[in-house]
Image (cartoon, rainbow, N blue to C red):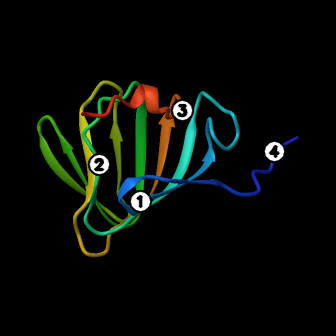
Amino acid sequence: MPQLIPAPTIIQVPGNKQIREYVGRVNTGVADVSIAHMVSPPGWSEPGQRPEFDEYTVVLRGTLQVEHEGGMMQVNGGQAILARKGEWVRYSTPNPDGAEYVAICLPAFTPDTVHRDE
């Protein structure tokens, strides 16, 4: 029988970014994938990271800026990006509208496997 996931777990992180995890280690105990709805305010940024998981990001609204070792790209609403495990990336939302997006991580995100810069 399919499993209903009645609501996400809301995870607050520094900088007013809000994470709503629907599937993953926190909300459903699943370790092989995480699916989260993110809302990042204008001016938000996080440290760079070199995760042990592939991260598929679909931008629903606004612009997500993605820095990588080869440069930088803007991912706009209606676009997506794949950051493969082992690649260094840094996400931010410098534009005045911020961004809303869905992140899917394979395997599931964990603080121990994201390897954020100090």
Q: Residue at x 35, y 67 (%)?
A: 41
* Mark 3 or 4, closer to the camera: 3
Q: CA distance from mark 4 to mark 1?
A: 28 Å
- Secondary structure state at the residue bearing disc 1: loop
- Secondary structure state at the residue bearing disc 4: loop
Q: Residue at x 63, y 40 (%)?
A: 26
Disc 1 vs disc 2: Cβ atoms closer than 8 Å? yes
* Mark 4 or 1, closer to the camera: 1
* Residue wearing tag 1: 17
Image position of 5 (left or right of 76): right
Instruction: Please state which amino acid type lies under the numbered disc 3.
Output: Ala
* Mark 2 or 4, closer to the camera: 2
Disc 2 vs disc 4: Cβ atoms closer than 8 Å? no
For the residue carrying disc 3, how many other residues have a C-alpha within 10 Å: few (<14), some (14-19), or many (20+)? many
Residue 102 marker: none
- Secondary structure state at the residue bearing disc 2: loop
* Residue wearing tag 3: 108
Q: CA distance from mark 3 to mark 2?
A: 19 Å
For the residue carrying disc 1, how many other residues have a C-alpha within 10 Å: few (<14), some (14-19), or many (20+)? some
Q: Residue at x 70, y 40 (%)?
A: 28
Q: Position of residue 20 (x, y in %)?
A: 56, 55
Q: Quadrant of residue 92?
A: bottom left
Instruction: Please state which amino acid type lies under the numbered disc 2.
Output: Glu
Image position of 104 (left or right of 24): left
User: Which comes sooner in the sequence, label 4 or label 1?
Assistant: 4
User: Which comes sooner in the sequence, label 2 or label 4?
Assistant: 4
User: Which comes sooner in the sequence, label 3 or label 2?
Assistant: 2
* Residue wearing tag 2: 46
Instruction: Please state which amino acid type lies under the numbered disc 4.
Output: Gln
